[in-house]
Image (cartoon, rainbow, N blue to C red):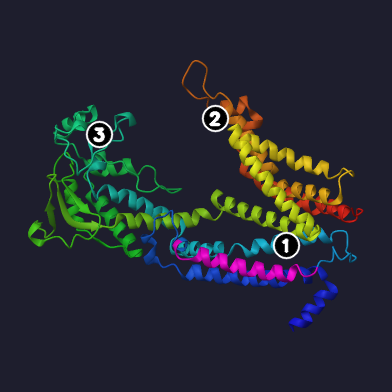
Amino acid sequence: MFNRLNNYLLTHYPLLWNTKAITVVSVSLLLHLLFFVFGYTGLDVTTLGRYDYSLYPAESSGMYTLSFLFSMAILIGWLVFFLRNNAFKEYYVIDKWFLAKQFILVTLIIFVSVTFFHSYRWGLESRARSFTSREELVRETDLLNLAAKFLPEDRSSYFKLNSCSLPDSMHVSYRDDYNYFDTTLTQNNQENNRRMRQVLKDADAFRYETYCKTMMNVEGMDNGWLARSNGWIRNGQKDSIRHVITGLQKVADKYRINYRLHVDSLVGFVFQDSLHTVKRTIGYSDPSGTDPSAMVYDNDGSAYVPDSSSRVRTDDYIEMREIENALNFIDRAHYRRWSEDELMFQTILLYAAICSAVVIMCYRLFTRKVFLFSVIGTIVWTILLVGLGIGSGSGNTILVFLLLLCFGSLLASRIDGFGKTTRGVLLTWHIWLLPFVTLILLALVHDVYNSYDQYIPGTVQYYSDAQMKKMYPVTYWITHHNELLARINLLLVVVYVAFVFMRLARKWHTSAEE
């Protein structure tokens, strides 16, 4: 069956036969499916809280290495067969667009063979999205932000000098484990610490209403949660507080996160005095290991541990960070699908695939002598450029030189006075640098834009974004659309290589030998 298919492709579609595109792409797609399945089945709801939202379990599971090994195995095996036959160098009769189509196929083969890990991550993210819809995520985030206010793990967020009603310049950070009354310490004689000692003497130094920390932000969340929760405190709405705490318990149950909360006691603590002061905190984790003799028990059976800072800690606890991690993981899974990070990742992979395809095509289009001299020459001028950049102290010098080298080598390759080998080397340097021309220009424009004086004359204030846009419309637009221009450049490079460079390579190939 395979031999018959191979013979059919050789007879009717020699380009597909030579590039092995059908075989390699099919194998790669199968591996993508397997990596996706491994990712989808490798994530369990119980593991979501264990990982910081900025990290994925896969990134420490060896999948990077496995993906790399599969990619190398496929590409090396493919190159062994692909480089065996070269209709162009053997002067076979090929159609006008043969080389253009070959370049596009080579780019496709490389791209689908280097993105296996991405499919694994897609599997993880798809699984995470299946646990919680976007609407459920918003509701659970609102519960987390509201309930956290009534579950004080420490008193720093409830300190009077951290109140949202104060300007940022007046905020002072408080630590429960620090003795601010020890005046023998030099730092305690600083102005902020003197203010802090004065406030710590107040009966309302730590109040539930002072809390204004947002545990987590997601698109669509209730931005009025703080005012709403303070209203509950002022109006004595115990049922509302009880509702959000029990709601957070359900969220913790869903993600298999540990907790032990005496809800009625926690609600009562909020209203134990008229100032709604924070007198007790809960644990970050299960305090069951505490010596029972150190525990003090209330009438309702809840226990607490007196500590050195005169506050008491109940035996209640909830692994709040794990809930936050789980929700952030899911939020990232929803957000990443078409995020700028995702598009940038795909763009980088496409640049890598196109540049690799260009190098392979140059090896097939030019003689080995030309290719070897091109590689050696590239190493030499790279070393010279690094030295030039260090000597000049400016990276822009290197960028300008690369632009001159790219276009200068193209013009020089058109001069008949140079030998065929020299012209081939120059043409190779030109196409190796071409994918980066737009990126170099973007970097130079960005540097020019940043060099503009952005201060309003006679003041220390910056021009607004709208003012900068009006004063420097061209550089402003380019600077704020560099990622879009970088993606458009991919299409331009493919078109240029396929329909311009291949024509130049054909002309070089048919020119007289030296």
| Mark number displayed over residue 161 | 3
- Residue 66 at what x, y percent from top left? 53, 68
Q: Mark 1 points at which residue?
A: 106
Looking at the picture, tell me which residue is in the foreground, 399 or 260.
Answer: 399
Q: In this view, does 434 lie to the left or right of 33?
A: right
Judge whether residue 190 can be spotted in this image: yes
Report the residue at 62% width, 24% height from top. 471
What amino acid type is highlighted by mark number 3?
A: Leu
Q: Magenta part mainly helix, strand or loop? A: helix
- Of marks 2 and 3, which one's residue comes earlier in the chain? 3
Report the residue at 86% width, 66% height from top. 90
- Of marks 3 and 1, which one's residue comes earlier in the chain? 1
Report the residue at 38% width, 56% height from top. 325
The magenta span reads 60-85
Report the residue at 25% width, 38% height from top. 210
Vertical comparison of 480 with 237: above or below? above
User: Circle 1: is it few (<14), some (14-19), or many (20+) Cα within 10 Å?
Assistant: many
Residue 498 in which image quadrant? bottom right
What amino acid type is highlighted by mark number 1?
A: Val
Q: Distance between the residues labelled 1 and 2?
A: 44 Å
What amino acid type is highlighted by mark number 2?
A: Asp
Q: Mark 2 points at which residue?
A: 465
